[in-house]
Image (cartoon, coloured by chain):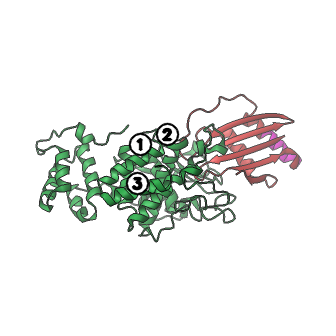
Chain colours: A green, B red
Amino acid sequence: MPTTSTARRTPPRTPCSIAPPDLLARVARQGTPEQRDAALAALAASASMRTQRSLLSRMRLELGAETANLFAGLEGASPTRRQTVYDNESQGRSGLPGTRKRGEDDPPVDDASVNSAYDGTAATYDLLQQVFGRDSLDGAGMELISSVHYGVDFDNAFWNGAQMVYGDGSGQLFVKGALVQALDVVGHELFHGVTSFTADLTYSKQSGALNEHFSDVFGSLVKQRHLDQTVDEADWLIGAGTLVPSMGKALRSMSEPGTAYDGDRQPADMAHYVDLPDDNDPRNDNGGVHTNSGIPNRAFYLVATALGGHAWETAGAIWYRTVTERLGSLAQFSDAAAQTMDVASSFGDAERAAVEKAWREVGVLT
Amino acid sequence: MKVSVVRGGGLAGITTRTELSASALGEEDAHTFTEKVRAAGLREARPAGGGPSGPDRTLYEVVLDDSGSVVRSRFTDDDLPESVRRLVEWVDARPERSHTRER
């Protein structure tokens, strides 16, 4: 299980850092503006060490927009986005990745799916890097590989552990070409990669529903940030317009779970939790991972709307730190509630209160 | 002979059922269907899949009903054999097949 502070376990060893990182972090949080800047500069002086870099990312989240420019200077050259999009040419798994179509510095090509994959991947990388200080899915700059036109009329898109694959859709379940065009779908799938490198939530029952939940949160945040939407302007839907219209408007609603499509069984609170077995039966969906994610999804929506403004700035920062630093692979809803409340405390009393109120409203806290 | 393909999981968590009976096909297509079913090896015993799948994988249940002899196989996007994928894609493309939501 990830520790909450690797910095505390690993004292600084570089000659230019004379105070322990946790002391510097406390000064940065509580000191005068001058003390804060000096403490951050001391932390940054040894930023080549992974522990300090992690602490700097955390301080950036805690201190917020006021210090964004300072961090841009302290952290040195920006990490570089690296991605390549391939055409699987209907070959499926054995033909991955396929034919190279567009690299990071290449102009758009004559294939809308290739360009959508490119743009969605870029928007996801940029949210992670510019808002949360994370360099790609692994935090170490891994190249992002996408393959479009996967299989024949394939009704799915997923992160396979090494790359993204996007089907074209059959026109029976998904509108043809729609999956890769949905920014929140792209962000959702790529965030499964972040989760695999951090909390690594086991994809079964509640821990699996949390895995789904964090992907819905950050998928939605990719879209909201791209559209520069406040919490009141966001639609809080996942995959709007991807299902054929006769089925419904979206895959999931974070604000009103259970209302996205005809037959949507997502519960909005623990009283309506759907207890399904995890038995490899496709009807049971790994123990209801896409069903019960409605409960934490609504908790996040309640927190974000209570805090107002842009959801990625505070609610997103609390959730980001929770999944990347606090949760273990078998975490349950109650663990997510406890850890998001604890993380929220470092943002302030109002933030902590909003998080606690939300988990109470969805019945995870009683 | 009838093949049913139940698909669930995926990024949507929506379950669908696609069915095709040889009796609905013309002679040539029925022959192709029989050959694809044979190539898919659905009658052979398979080890049951174990452990949680990766996120958002399509979960497949392929049921072969051959004159009352029923064989059920389950796969994910990670272990779906090429021969079964070709059968499923062929079934999907037949206008005679039925396609419904399970739940």
Magenta-highlighted residues: B26-35
Foreground pick, A67 / A191: A67
Circle 2 sits on which residue? A202
From the top left corner, tell me how far across and down residue A260 is, in percent.
60, 61
Q: Which mark is residue A199?
A: 1
Q: Residue at x 55, y 56 (%)?
A: A268
Q: Which mark is residue A356?
A: 3
Foreground pick, A154 / A134: A134
Q: Are marks 1 and 3 in contact (CB under 8 Å)?
A: no
Is residue A218 something one can see in this rendering?
A: no
User: What is the secondary structure assignment of the residue under circle 2?
Assistant: loop
Closer to the chain start, of discs 3 and 2, is 2
Say if B62 sits above or below A98 in the image. Answer: above
Closer to the chain start, of discs 1 and 3, is 1
From the top left corner, tell me how far across and down residue A342 is, in percent.
34, 49
**What residue occupies the far bottom of the structure in this picture?**
A233
The quadrant of the image that shows the N terminus of chain A is: top left
Q: Are marks 3 and 2 on the same chain?
A: yes
User: What is the secondary structure assignment of the residue under circle 1?
Assistant: loop
